[in-house]
Amino acid sequence: MPRGAEIVVRGAGVTYPGATVPTLQDLTLTIAPGEFLVVVGPSGCGKSTLLRTINRLIPLNAGSIAIDGIDIASLDPVALRRGIGYAIQAVGLFPHMRVGANVAIVPELLGWSRERIAARVDALLALVHLDPERYRDRFPRELSGGEAQRVGVARAIAGEPRVLLMDEPFGAVDAIVRSQLQDEMLLLVRELATTTLFVTHDVDEALLLADRIVVVNRGRIEQTGTPLEVLAGPASPFVERLFHANDAVIELREKARERQRLR
Ligand SMILES: Nc1ncnc2c1ncn2[C@@H]1O[C@H](COP(=O)(O)OP(=O)(O)OP(=O)(O)O)[C@@H](O)[C@H]1O
Ligand SMILES: [Mg+2]
């Protein structure tokens, strides 16, 4: 089983063509082999942009990214992407290809044997709670949104990548399926020891899954730390608000205090 890669981001910056302000600014971050790093932050802060710089869907305007010590700018982008699993909220399954064929794309490119590919496809479908017998030969249009998303996750890990990029991969599933997928995800990445960057809006999901959390705000890193560190010692009022925005207990306490004051 391949080990996860180390990713070193140094002073990374991205300014989209025509934009007046950078979307990512001076981002520096080391992700250890096998680490599960969760990126959180408000809509538009640059989370997806950061992920896409790592598989070179978006070029850097400043700084560098190295995977296992090799600057990705020196690699062939297609070969680079073959070694990086990528799952996105919009899923992006190929509509004319059956589920099994979608999952098999990277193993096919890697030249695995028929038998190995077939076994892998079935194992992955089972892993994301889709009965291979029932789902293998369906077309993407015959899936619900949540089922399609699970196929997207299966496809992303199919080639046993050493780096996994997941951009809100569980966005379209209900709470129960989401929590099942989160549990499976934890087991899976531990087993594969894949270095994972996982983007989510959901701070509970971040706290559950992360070895480390990176809080991004307006294209800059606001804080990096373990879930406990971020919860116990938020580096700024922004981080504090982000992690307690849905904290019903704190809200109730504040309301109670407010009532006391009004009396
Ligand atoms: N291809 C692009 N061209 C120009 N601007 C872009 C492009 N992609 C994203 N942006 C802009 O860059 C900023 C960051 O976008 P990005 O998609 O990285 O945010 P995000 O943190 O993933 O947000 P969300 O949580 O809503 O997915 C936004 O202001 C967005 O409008
Ligand atoms: Mg995004």
Image (cartoon, grey):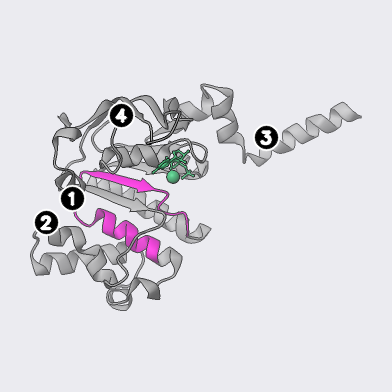
Asked if residue 150 is among those painted magenta in the image, a careful observer would answer: yes
Q: Mark 1 or mark 4: which comes first in sequence? A: 4
Query: Which tag is nearer the camera, tag 2 or tag 4?
Result: 4
Q: Mark 2 to mark 3: distance in Å?
A: 51 Å
| Image vertical order of residue 106 relative to residue 59, above or below | below
Check disc 2 and report the residue beneath it: 110
Residue type at mark 4: give it.
Asn
Q: Mark 3 or mark 4: which comes first in sequence? A: 4
Which residue lies most toward the front here? Answer: 18
Residue type at mark 3: give it.
Ile
Q: Mark 2 to mark 4: distance in Å?
A: 31 Å
| Image vertical order of residue 155 relative to residue 99, above or below | above
Query: Which tag is nearer the camera, tag 2 or tag 3?
Result: 2
Q: Which residues are magenta?
A: 148-172
Residue type at mark 1: give it.
Arg
Q: Mark 1 or mark 2: which comes first in sequence? A: 1
- In the image, ligand 2 is in what quadrant? top left
From the Cβ of disc 3, is ligand 1 less than 8 Å away?
no
Check disc 4 and report the residue beneath it: 61
Q: Position of residue 157 (x, y in %)?
A: 25, 54
Q: Mark 1 to mark 2: distance in Å?
A: 8 Å
Q: Which is nearer the eye, 79 or 117?
A: 79
Mark 1 residue element: helix
> In the picture, residue 98 is in which quadrant?
bottom left
Instruction: Tell me if mark 3 has few (under 14), some (14-19) or many (20+) residues whose alpha carbon lies within 10 angstroms of its own.
Output: few
